[in-house]
Amino acid sequence: MSNLRESNIPDGYLQNGSGHLVPAELVSDIDKTRNNLVMEIVSKANDLRGLLGDFKADVFGDIQAFTELSAERYQVKLGGIKGNITLSSFDGRYQVKLSQADVKIFDERLQAAKVLVDSCIHRWTEGSRIEIKALVEHAFQTDREGKISLGRIYTLMQLDIDDEEWQQAMQALRDSMQVVSTKSYLRIYVRNKQGKLEQMPIDLAGV
């Protein structure tokens, strides 16, 4: 079990929520018992997280090696897994899926796109209803972390509008998208008695 005790806390003391050292004899037995239970659970969770991390790394390596082995039959040399892969057991009961998704952000050109879109909306809605403008404003709303929803922007970009300024705005949106990283997801499926594949409840996204 991992040791979660802070090295700078001397023996015979506990640290409270304000960061102050409290002599252990001044802490009630139930508080100490509760603290020990929580620390034990967190320690076990950390150990389990480490095991899941090792498992994920091993599986990714195994899939990489198998994919390269399969490609060698066609005299193809792979430089790494660059797409989505699904591996099935011979009886079709189990599936292992490795998927990769780009993590994207918007740069400063998003602001130019917003100005162009607003200009289009003002032209189109002059003297008309304002619901369309509200829908577009919704697409550019940010979350608590100040991030724009890719899904809402994609929906906006899929609109087939024959307008030069609108097309310029959509080009600005496309140019503003920057890929900052690629995130890999590993999912394992088991076919149930009804023949439907169900995902095993193992959360590997965050490890």
Image: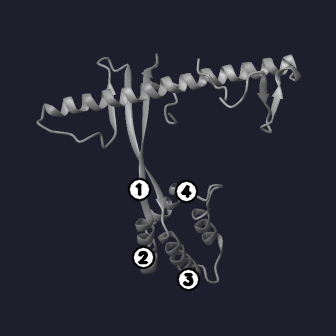
Q: How far apart are the two marked residues, 3 and 2, measured between alpha carbons?
A: 15 Å
Residue 68 image position (x, y, % from top left): 22, 33
Classify mark 3: residues with Cα within 10 Å, few (<14), some (14-19) or many (20+): few
Residue 136 relative to residue 58: left or right: right
Residue 135 image position (x, y, % from top left): 60, 65
Residue 7 image position (x, y, % from top left): 65, 29
- Callout 4 amino acid: Ser
Q: Which of marks 4 and 2 is nearer the N terminus?
A: 4
Badge 1 is on which residue? 179
The image's colouring method is: one colour
- Callout 2 amino acid: Gln
Question: What mark, if any, has residue 154 been given in the picture?
Answer: none
Residue 65 versus residue 46: which sits nearer the camera?
46
Residue 70 image position (x, y, % from top left): 20, 30
Question: What mark, if any, has residue 123 been given in the picture?
Answer: 3
Work out whether residue 96 can be spotted.
Answer: no
Badge 2 is on which residue? 168
Q: Which of marks 4 and 1 is nearer the N terminus?
A: 4
Q: How many labels does the image show?
A: 4
Disc 4, SS: loop
Work out whether residue 33 can be spotted.
Answer: yes
Q: Which of marks 3 and 2 is nearer the N terminus?
A: 3
- The label nearer to you, 3 versus 2, is 2
Work out whether 186 lies above or below 139.
above
Q: Quick one: quadrant of the N terminus?
A: top right
Classify mark 4: residues with Cα within 10 Å, few (<14), some (14-19) or many (20+): some
Work out whether 184 lies above or below 56.
below
